[in-house]
Amino acid sequence: MVEGIIVILGSSNSDTGELSSIAHERCGLAMELWKQYPRYYIVPTGGFGAHFNRSPRPHGAYIREQLVRSGVPSESVLDPVESLNTIEDALLLRPVLDKLTPARILAITSDYHLERAKFVFERIIAQEVAWYSTDTDEEGCTEDLAALRQHERRALARLVTQGIPI
């Protein structure tokens, strides 16, 4: 059993692998948490998808590289969970949790995504998750934040009415 893990939910990167401002914000928060809990492992999520990563490598690999460049030892950052969306984040994280059996799970996302992420994880992960969210910098955001918020409202409403398609 490990003491704990820090899960960074994926966001987006450019076609060349440059992380979005939102991904950088999530990495920054992960660094802050890891400094408080240096014995925790970090698990980045994010694979490929037309809406967030069309580069040749999984999004989580870029997150992993950013964390290592920022000072997290490579052995503390696990291989990424190559998911397509929030539901897959939770589903594909379950085998990692079964293997590591962490005492605590800390999860990181952005403020606009928090409600849907909690909804999904509460139904898929059989362990309590402590949530941390970034305050998205509206002025420095490299993505269409209004569109992201609208997507989150629609996606959560769909999940509430139709359930999680597992």
Image: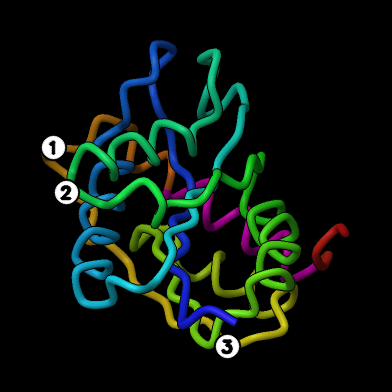
Residue with the mark numbered 3: 128
Dot 2: within a 10 Å radius of its alpha carbon, few (fewer than 14), some, or many (20 or more) residues?
Answer: few
Residue at position x 72%, y 83% from top?
126
Where residue 51 sits in the image (x, y, percent)?
56, 27
Q: Quick one: SS at disc 1? A: loop
Choose between 145 and 41: the one closer to the eye. 41
Residue at position x 35%, y 73% from top?
39
The mark closer to the camera, 2 or 3, is 3
Q: Main secondary structure of the magenta part?
A: helix
Choose between 27 and 14: the one closer to the eye. 27
For the residues labelled 1 and 3, the Cα–Cα distance comes to 33 Å
For the residues labelled 2 and 1, the Cα–Cα distance comes to 5 Å
Residue with the mark numbered 2: 137
| Sequence order check, earlier mark of 1 and 3 | 3
What residue span does the magenta drawing correspond to? Answer: 149-161
Q: Pick the quarter of the image with the N terminus.
A: bottom right
Identify the coloring: rainbow
Q: Is residue 11 above or below residue 93?
A: above
Residue with the mark numbered 1: 140
Q: Quick one: SS at disc 3? A: loop
Q: Is residue 7 above or below residue 151?
A: below
Q: Are marks 2 and 1 in contact (CB under 8 Å)?
A: yes
